[in-house]
Amino acid sequence: MRVKVISRSTDEFTRERSQDLQKVFRNYDPALRSQEKAVEYTRALNAAKLEKIFARPFIGAMDGHVDAVSCMAKNPNYLKAIFSGSMDGDIRLWDIAARKTVCQFPGHQGAVRGLATSTDGDLLVSCGVDCTVRLWKVPMLKMVDTNDAIGDASQPSAVYTWKHAFWGVDHQWDGNLFATVGAQVDIWDQNRSEPINSFEWGKDTVLSVRFNPGEPDVLITSASDRSITLYDLRMSSPARKLIMKTRCNSICWNPREPMNFTAANEDTNCYSFDARKLDEAKVVHKGHVSAVMDIDYSPTGREFVTGSYDRTVRIFQYNGDHSREIYHTKRMQRVFCVKYTYDGTYLVSGSDDTNLRLWKSKASEQLGVLLPRERRKQEYLDAVKERYKHLPEVKRIVRHRHLPKPIYKAASLRRTMIEAENRKEERRRAHSAPGSMPVQPFRKRRIIKEVE
């Protein structure tokens, strides 16, 4: 007669050292765990609550400027380096890790309006209202002691004086050209003292410029005549122009989908467009209660950050209509410039109160090195939250944000005004001849026309 007996080797379930984890044998048969969904829901609820408890997005402030911070630029060579320019003409290179100034670039006689670095990170281009473009050699950023004295960079490698004040600058992603904007769009070569090409479409001031990351010869500008204009350096004239109801203060291309761009508008919204189809916005990103001043995409292209005149910084999904995160402090004033770091982990904002502020892109993310078990647990909790995010209790906790009272009241008032406007339009349509007032989606409502 054959008898089956349980046979186990002690080597399979005995720890070699006391520090080792006990091996746990699991049976994944769903019939044995009838309460699995209830358990997972509780875990999702607890994870959502813990995320709120540990949300500490603000890391620190970097002070040193004596006037409002007007523009910033990242350094492709160094993850922890960022340039900032202020309204008094001061340009600084910061070490984000130490939160200290590494060196200063003196020379501008008025507000610095634009900063850009070359793709190799060796050249910094600055321009301002003193009608000059200055080219600087970027110093090597070493590990600096916090007690070191702040040094001045040497004289600029080139100073180009032009006929009008400048409002912005951007460097080509792959090449030696850079573009400045002001009364017109000027294309410069690093080795030439005058523009090699100039574009003009209308007489209004051009506010911002961005080169396309995928097509080096394509650039886009926004102007004070409420227009967004596409240029191709291979053509002798501008390519296309879109006129909106309110002006765009800043524009940024999506680095992973270079045919798409997002514009930060004066009417508190951001509009994402496909450059091939400008007659309607792909997505309208709402949330701010005052003009959006600057915008910057994450290196992943999945989300972008905006800074607004309402003294807040918001993070949006690239296809989301409302912000997933909102950052504010009591002392932070109107935000004029924002940047993602090149690893997508941190944000830097520059505001009217002369400070740069460093934030985490994920408010509750743990800083420092994570053990593999900690990382796997965090991934599991994120997956559980994603699975149960539609349930009322989890949804309420995940969406809730504490807002300053002025912003909360302004948002409430804005909602009331929009609802009243919609009711008025519905009544007007109900009392008009059928078909005389067609319904126009909001994605098209803010666009006046497209000019070829």
Image (tube, helix red, strand yellow):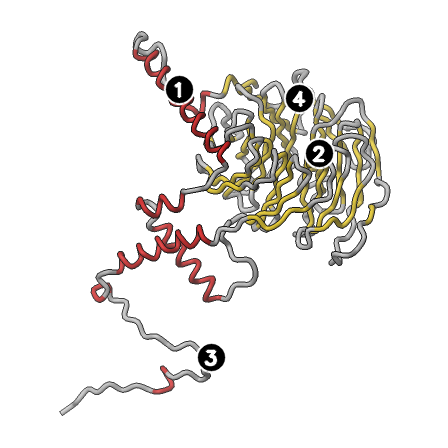
| Residue denoted by label 3 | 19
The residue type indicated by label 2 comes to Gly
Q: 10 Å neighbourhood of mark 1: few (<14), some, or many (≥20)?
A: few
| Residue denoted by label 2 | 114
Give the SS element for disc 4: loop
The residue type indicated by label 3 comes to Gln
The residue type indicated by label 4 comes to Ser
Q: Is residue 246 visible?
A: yes
CA–CA distance in space, label 2 to label 4: 24 Å
Q: Position of residue 432 (x, y in %)?
A: 32, 8
In the depicted structure, whether residue 67 falls above or below residue 56 = above
Q: Nearer the viewer, mark 3 or mark 2?
A: 3
Q: Position of residue 141 (x, y in %)?
A: 75, 53
Q: Nearer the viewer, mark 2 or mark 4?
A: 2
The residue type indicated by label 1 comes to Gln
| Residue denoted by label 1 | 440
Judged from this view, the residue extending furthest toward the top is: 433
In the depicted structure, whether residue 426 falls above or below residue 293 = above
The mark total stands at 4
> Which of the 4 image quadrants contains residue 105?
top right
CA–CA distance in space, label 3 to label 4: 71 Å
Q: Residue at 67% across / 51% down in the picture?
A: 96
Q: Is residue 273 visible?
A: no
* First along the sequence among labels 3 and 4: 3
* First along the sequence among labels 1 and 2: 2
